[in-house]
Image: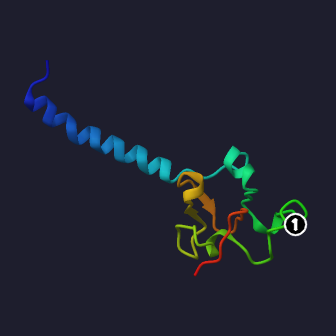
Amino acid sequence: MQTRRQFIQIVPVAGATLMAGREALANAKLDENDAQAKALGYAHDATKVDAKKQPKWAKGQICSGCQLYQGKAADAWGGCPLFGGKQVAGKGWCNAWVKKA
């Protein structure tokens, strides 16, 4: 049985551990072979998108110019809600691309 003092000592450590784990997940980079990435035609480099396979692609469309991109325009990587908040390349592209307002 734990005492109140032991419980109070454990809570900050547990909280810090949870926060570190959450931050690690938020900084995880999306793998192009991820099932969701493949389903949306995601590529780390938009210049390498095959226009025949991805007819929605147009020159100049990159993740950092997408409404869903959660990083700054100059960031190399930023979060995307379509991929569970995983980091996508700022110069990447996928079929869900929507021009920033």
Residue 34 visible at all: no
- Badge 1 is on which residue? 51
Depicted 48 relative to depicted 72: above or below:
above
Quarter of the image where the C terminus is located:
bottom right
Q: Is residue 6 left or right of residue 62?
A: left
Most extreme residue toward the bottom is: 101
Dot 1 falls on a residue whose secondary structure is: loop
Q: Can you see residue 85?
A: yes
Please state the horizontal and vertical placement of residue 59, each as a whole percent of the image: 80, 77
Position in image of residue 83 (x %, y %)? 59, 53
Left or right: where does residue 72 sit relative to residue 6? right
Q: Which picture quadrant has residue 6?
A: top left
Mark 1 Cα-neighbour bin, 10 Å: few <14, some 14–19, many ≥20 = few
- Give whichever of 13, 78 is nearer the camera: 78
Q: Is residue 99 above or below residue 53?
A: below
Q: Quadrant of residue 81?
A: bottom right
Q: Quadrant of the N terminus?
A: top left
Outermost residue, top side: 1
Image coordinates for residue 70, horizontal then vertical, percent:
52, 67
* Image-based side of 88 in relation to 7, left or right: right
Tell me which amino acid carries mark 1. Answer: Ala
Q: Residue at x 83, y 62 (%)?
A: 54
In this rendered view, identify the residue nearer to me: 13 or 101.
101
